[in-house]
Amino acid sequence: MNISKARLKRLPKVELHCHLDGSIRVPTMIDLAQKDNIKLPSMDRNELKKMLVIGSNRGTLEDYLKRFDYTLSVMQTPESLTRTAFELIEDVSKENVKYIEIRYSPILHTENGMTISESVEAVQDGLKQGEKEFGVQSGIIVCGIRNISPEVSLKLADITVQYKNKGVVGFDLAGAEENYPAKDHREAFYLILNHNINATIHAGEAFGPSSIHQAIHYCGAHRIGHGTRLKEDKDLMQYVNDHRIPLEICLTSNWQTRSIRSLKYHPIKFYYEQGIRVTLNTDNRLMSGTTLTDEFKLANDLFRFSLHDFREFTVMAAKSAFMPHLKRVELLHNIAEEMEQEFNLEPEFIDRK
C-alpha cells in the first residue's frame, strides 16, 4: 500500500535518536557564523548545504562525522545552543512529532569558554521555549564520545547525574565505533546505572554484534542506537527481543555510512517481523537530508509498511521513551486517541511489541 507523504506527515510521531549538532538549519549556521565571525567553507546557503548533506556520497562513519566540525564551530555559545534547540522543536512540530529525545555532547561545545553546565542549561532553555510555543515534549540525552576518552565520558556521566530530572533523561555513547569499544567506558555507565538513569549506546552501526553485546552486558544499555548488525548473532538477537531492548533505526543514515550495502537489504522488516521493538528515527536531519516523515515514507516505499505498522512503530517508540511511566502512559493514550480519531486506527497496544 502506497501512502502519500502528506498523510504520513500528519501521523503523530515520536523520535528517540536525533543529534542536535547534526540537525541545525543551514541559514542558522550562516547567521551564527556572521555574528560570531566564524569562517565556514562557504557562506552561500546552497553551497554550504551541498557540502554538508551526504546525499548519495556514501562513505564510512568517520567520513560522515567529519562534517560535524562545521556545525560545532557555530554552536559554541549559550545563545547559539538555545536557538538551535528551539528551532529543532519548531521543525519537528511541523510534522506532528509529539515527543523527541535530542542528544548531543556538551564537551564539544566548550571550545570558547562555555562550561558544560552552561551548555546543558542553554539547550534546556531552547527546548522549554519550544515546548511552550509548539507543544512538543522533549528530553536531553548527554553523549559520551568513544574516541575521546573514558575519563571525559565519566565527566559527562557526572553532569548527567547532576541534571537528572532537570531536563536530562539519559546517557549515550557516540562517536567512532571501530577500535573504540564500549567496555572501555563502563565506569561512566556504572555511575549512570547506579543513579537509576536511562542508557542508550550507538552499537552495531560500524562494527559487528560484539559491539551490541558490550553495550548491553558491559554497560547496561536499555536501548541500542542503530543495531543494524544485530542479525549476525541470532542468540544475542533473541536476548534483545526477549528483554524488549529497543533498536533506534535510522534508515537513511545507515545507508550513507555503509552500515548496509543497500537500503533494500536493511534488516528493519526482519526485526519487525521477529517482534523486536524497533523505532524509526532521523539521526541527523541536516547531514542525512531527512525528516522523520521522510524516514516513514522511505520505509513505506521500500518495505510496504502500512498505516497500522506505522502506528506500531510510534507506539513502540513511545513505550521506549526515557520518560516517567505515568507521563509515558499519557503520551501513549494521546497518540492512540489521535490515531483512532484521525486515521481510524484502533488504539489497542500489542503487548508482544
Image (tube, rainbow, N blue to C red):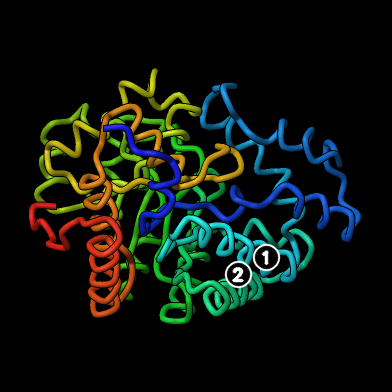
The amino acid beneath tag 2 is: Val
Of 42 and 14, which appears nearest the observer? 14
Task: Decide if residue 323 is in sight here.
Answer: yes
Residue 271 image offset from top left, x and y in percent: 20, 36
Q: Residue at x 49, y 28 (%)?
A: 257
| For the residues bearing labels 1 and 2, Cβ distance under 8 angstroms | yes
Q: Residue at x 68, y 36 (%)?
A: 52
In the image, taking residue 251 as reference, residue 129 lies left or right, namely: right
Residue indicated by mark 2: 123
Residue indicated by mark 1: 81
Residue 160, above or below 339: below
Which quarter of the figure has residue 343? Answer: bottom left
Residue 329, above or below 152: below
The amino acid beneath tag 1 is: Leu
Task: Decide if residue 151 is in sight here.
Answer: no
Of 294 and 180, which appears nearest the observer? 294
In the image, taking residue 25 as reference, residue 30 lies left or right, namely: right
Residue 140 image offset from top left, x and y in percent: 48, 67
